[in-house]
Amino acid sequence: MPGKYFQLQRYVGRLRRLPAAFAKPITGYEAEALTELVYQKTLAFNRITELDLGMGSERLLLALSIALGERAPGEPARVLDFGGACGVHYKIATLFFPDVEFRWAIVETPAVLQKSRSLGTASLKFYEDIASAKLWLGNVDLLNSNSALQYVEDPLRTTRQLLGLTPKVVLWERLMLSNGATHADQQRKMLFDHGPGVTPPGFKNRRVWHDITRLSRADFLAAHEPQYTLRCKAEDDGHFSTYLFSQRKG
């Protein structure tokens, strides 16, 4: 039964990945190779209509459904997408809610902004800071943040700042929290793991190291009290957490 213990295709695949494993790693979201990959993946995603379940697309659709029910009749759905990259979450929303008028503001790093500004429309805008995004949006029906909070300098302060906008619905996706005290850590991934969908040709896979801050789970949850009710939560093998909140009634 040699096939049970030795699988030739898997072995060859590992050998092919070795050069990427030993190449100099990319560090930080300002790296050109990383932003270019996410940008190109987003362009490709514009031309397909499939969900990327690895990035929590189905939970985004659930949060949007709740937020659409909370908005005032005749008003656009106003979304602040903190760390929304080049707009893939907006594309998912418009694919599945084609009749909804959106006003969607993405807050991102300067490198991502420079790359993605050309994708902006009357309904989709990119901003470098939360205050500018809020000024354009007015009210916030949905605060969406997917795998972003752990990369900011002070996650608790950012959490409080975003909740201070009083969004009606809040979706935190792919959080990296601490079950103890808040502490610094490092995340190690491969380049091709970033961005939605299949990697387009022309890119070389490399290691990517991110400095992150794991916010205390207790402090994170306390920041939502007493304004918000937890609607659902999910854990992914103990590495990532998802939380969906809505404003308390009355």
Image: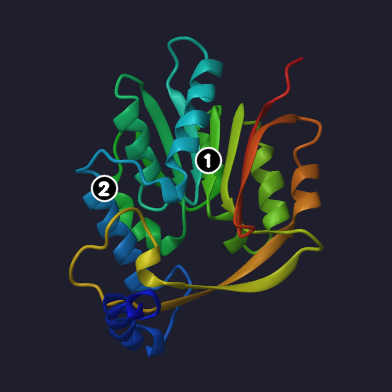
Would residue 181 appear left or right of 212 to someone viewing this image?
right
Residue 46 drawn at (x, y percent): 24, 44
Q: In terms of depth relative to the viewer, which is nearer, 47 or 34?
A: 47
Q: Residue at x 41, y 30 (%)?
A: 103
Q: Which picture quadrant has residue 125?
A: top left
Neighbours of disc 1 within 10 Å: few (<14), some (14-19), many (20+): many
Q: In terms of depth relative to the viewer, which is nearer, 135 or 20?
A: 20
Q: What is the number of the mark on residue 45?
A: 2
Reply above or below: 140 against 177.
above
Reply above or below: 109 against 125.
below
Q: Which picture quadrant has residue 24?
A: bottom left
Which residue matches tag 1?
144
Q: Secondary structure at mark 1?
A: strand
Residue 52 drawn at (x, y percent): 37, 46
Q: Are marks 2 and 1 in contact (CB under 8 Å)?
A: no
Q: Residue at x 48, y 20 (%)?
A: 68
Q: Secondary structure at mark 2?
A: helix
Would residue 6 appear left or right of 241 to someone viewing this image?
left
Q: Amino acid at mark 1?
A: Asn
Q: Amino acid at mark 2?
A: Phe
First reached walking from the N terminus: tag 2 or tag 1: 2
Residue 228 drawn at (x, y percent): 73, 30
Neighbours of disc 2 within 10 Å: few (<14), some (14-19), many (20+): many
| Separation of marks 2 and 1 at Cα, in angstroms | 19 Å
Figure quadrant of the N terminus: bottom left
Reply above or below: 154 against 64.
below
